[in-house]
Image: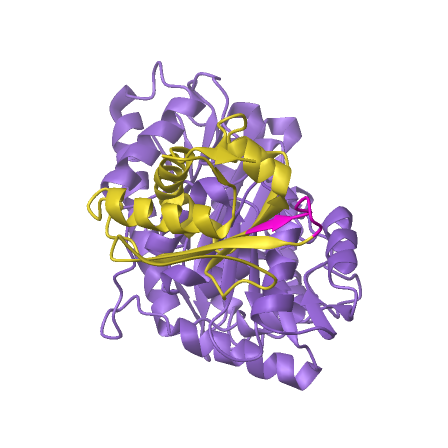
Amino acid sequence: MPYDLRPDSPYWIDNRARVRGLQEAMAREGIDVYLASRPRTMSFIMDAFCPWRSYLVVPPKGDPVFFTFVVDAVRVADETWLPEDNVRAYAPMGGQDQVSAVSCFVLEELGLSKGRVGYEDGMSTWTPEGYLSRYEYEAFRAALPGFDFVNSHELVDAMSVIKDAGTIARFREASRQVDEGHKAVREAISNGGWKGLTETVIGGIGALAMRRAGSVSEWNFAGLNEISSGRRTALGACTPPTTRPLAAGEPLMVDLHSMHRLALGDHSHNYLIGPATKAQRRHADNFVELVRTVLGAWKAGSTPSGLAEAMFERAEALGCSDFVVPGCEHGIGLFGDEWRIGSAADSPLPYWTDPDHAYAPGEMVICAMQYASPADGIGFRYENPIVIGERGVEPLSKYPLGIEEV
Amino acid sequence: MERTRYLSEEWAAIAGAKLRAELDPQKMNKASASMSNIYERCSDGVDRFIFIECSDGELARFEVGSGEPPKAEFRIHGDYDTFAMITRGELGSQKALMTGRLKLKGNMAKALRLSSLADRINKVLAGIPTDY
């Protein structure tokens, strides 16, 4: 929909302030022009959904100029805060391919002939991170011969760690939409309603309810809403739904995703389809206790490794440490920013989350915990966006924590 | 109408008059834009241009000349022969762009919105008896 936010909106983000912040960081690092290619940067600066391969050129001063595939340029221009003329298209035409269009803008409109280009490179656990490809890099270098290219994605990443009020409000609304999805799923599977339903249908029931609540996308690259049942719940932390029918005596994992103004709802809830065995009940109670333990320990100053220690310590006491999957979180931000914690990539393993990263007030992550007992054919997942505060965290999905038998 | 030589002073005078007379501001969507077509490798070795500026759908400025054209929102470069083939209706302008025989500089998103208007201008110019 057309960009309609005003400063008095709870969802307002001061996008020009973000651009100025990036330009200040560019000046500090001696970057003359920033060439962004990652979806997370597009979301962060454009405040619009940019799914096609796009490039954002941020000059030292003034508004950036955005280039995207010609089929989508008019829509993006309609939805972003940027002036219409700052949204450009590239197309398979002479002088209008992506490298020609972007380099012509830098050379002729910005009037730059030499300097340092900040670009985005690295590696990622998920496919669509959007780093500049080697081919693009070589082509841009050839088209901009007077420039040095400097990997600079940290400038954007550092700015996007702490969430502003508008961003948090968007996440809060996305989580409300997810909760509506969970209510619909619970209603559908209760009182024997699960009979004849499949994982994919559960995903669809959740999607319809979330869309009715205002969500615009299930956004997730790993199968949209991730649903698993039976032994599939124990197969790990990626469960694109299948046509497998739900069955009595099995676990059901429902991981729903919504999107509100690029903020991402991501809440996973678990069920036991009755009749549950004592062993299943014990696994379920253990997992809920572990989630409570981790959420209770989390606050500003906590670290990923410290939380993992607390989780394993509690698991040892409960006698379930063999079933705990390491890790308690993944990063989150506006669309495209879904994995690595967005701070400086100076961890012992580059491009992985720093285990000693100290969470700061205003930071958001997904509390993401996974439990799996393949031998028993059972597993659970908890995910919930949390806002980190000085004394604790605020889980944004308000759906009650628990694993009930239906 | 007598035949004139493409891009000559006589041709330019006829083209300007014809565009002013035949372009309907309503059908031109009351658009305001400017465009330079730059003809490279003309037969005498000189680069020539056609500069067209519309304001609220009306032709505000039309120039034919050589050397550097006036600053325009859109610049289209190509061989004289390519432009001549387009004007004679032997080659579509879209195909010329998509095969790289013409190169466009300017905001592609806006150019798309104006492409039908460029076609209307080309149709008017194609109606001038011309020697290439």
| Residue at 66% over, 28% down | A375
- Which residue is outermost to the front? B2
Q: Is residue B41 magenta?
A: yes
Q: In this view of the protein, which residue sits in the foreground, B112 or A75?
A: B112
- Please say whether residue A214 is visible from this viewpoint: yes
Measured as percent of width and height from the top left, residue B20 is found at 28, 50
Q: Colour of chain A?
A: purple
Q: Count how many numbered circles sit on residues in the image.
A: 0
Identify whether A213 is placed above or below B1.
below
Q: Residue furthest top?
A: A196
Residue plotted at (36% across, 73% down) = A165
The quadrant of the image that shows the N terminus of chain B is top left
Pick the front one: A326 or B2: B2
Q: Is residue B87 left or right of residue B20?
A: right
Q: Quadrant of residue A231?
A: top right
The answer to whether residue A342 shows anywhere in this view is no
Q: Position of residue B36 (x, y in %)?
A: 50, 55
Q: Quadrant of residue A351?
A: bottom right
The residue shown at (47%, 29%) is: A251
Q: Point out the residue furthest to the left here.
A: B26
Q: Is residue A203 above or below residue A264?
A: above
Q: In this picture, is A169 found above or below A323?
A: below
* Main SS category, magenta section: loop
The C terminus of chain B lies in which quarter of the figure?
Answer: top right
Left or right: A258 in relation to A154:
left
Query: In yellow, which chain?
Result: B
Residue nearest the observer in this picture, A204 or A292: A204
Residue A30, quarter of picture = bottom right
Q: Position of residue A247 (x, y in %)?
A: 43, 18
What are the residue bounds of the magenta stretch? B38-45
Relative image position of residue A161 (x, y in whole percent) = 54, 70
